[in-house]
Amino acid sequence: MPEGDTVWRSCRRLHEVLAGRTLTRSEFRVPALATTDLTGTRVLEVRSRGKHQLFRFDNQMTLHTHLRMEGTWRIFTAGRRWSGGPGHEIRSILATAEHDAVGYRLPVIELIPTANESDAVGHLGPDLLGPDWDPEEAGRRMSAEPDRTIGEALLDQRNLAGIGTLYRAEVLFLQGLHPRTPVAKVKNLTRLVERAQQLLFVNRWRPEQATTGDLRPGRRTYVFDRELEPCRRCGTPIQAETFGPLGQERRSFWCPRCQPLVETDVSA
Ligand SMILES: [Zn+2]
């Protein structure tokens, strides 16, 4: 699943090729937008908000898309063959004289008045890579549910927008926190989310997501996707489990030695 940094980079690329240009062709292959044609409309900007994409047009409308697990926006030089998947998986085409932006397998695609964007993304917490980033507000939102696990709180986009399973696993390792630690037991939520923001920030321009500082394949993460492999710090086999709210269960990775579970206060 794309995380906030991947969506941010994708929107920057889309913005570079589309912003300020007039659409020479548009297609939406979803029933609600089947007859919509934006040909002749100018693209003002393309922005990310957490893991959402917002394409703003000069007709005061915004195309809102979300990639979820499978979706992707691909950019091709005009006239080149498209290679993002079979044609029946295409949900949207936005073309200018120079480029074709093609949205594949987009589970969320809707056209809304720009003035009503908050209906689509207003529920999101501070965006780790957005101008509104506010670690204290993210911490406040997480503390509102003190009994919840920190692993679930970090993935809840209403608390802070942009973290997926990779950055969750990695930031919890770096802070020595077991994913099932209750939020109330995390001493410094602000520090935790600041650390997460730093991880996304350093990765925002590169396709390889590395939290170890080592970009070589197989060395990029401490615990993510390393089940039963030795911890890079202590050698203990990395553990994994799937947990989370019903229907939103996600894979979690941790080192049992570096990230012990602290559920209750130890009385002196
Ligand atoms: Zn360890």
Image (spheres, rainbow, N blue to C red):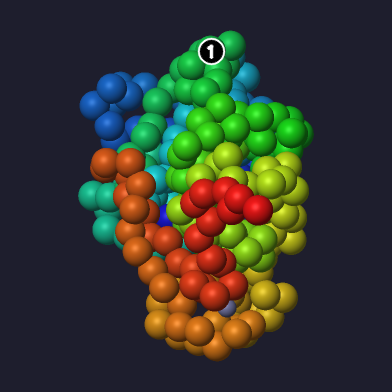
Question: Does residue 44 appear in this view?
Answer: yes
The residue to which callout 1 is attached is 116
Residue displayed at 48% across by 22% down: 120
Percent of width and height locating residue 160 = 60, 37
Point out the quarter of the image occupied by ligand 1. Answer: bottom right
Left of 235 or right of it: where is 238?
A: left
Percent of width and height locating residue 87 = 27, 53
Circle 1 sits in a helix, a strand or a loop, which is it?
A: helix
Percent of width and height locating residue 51 = 52, 42
In the rendered structure, which amino acid carries the disc numbered 1?
A: Asn
Percent of width and height locating residue 244 = 35, 47
Task: Classify residue 129 by image quadrant.
Answer: top right
Residue displayed at 49% across by 56% down: 179
Q: Is residue 164 above or below residue 49?
A: below
Left of 7 or right of it: where is 126?
A: right
Left of 22 or right of it: where is 103?
A: left
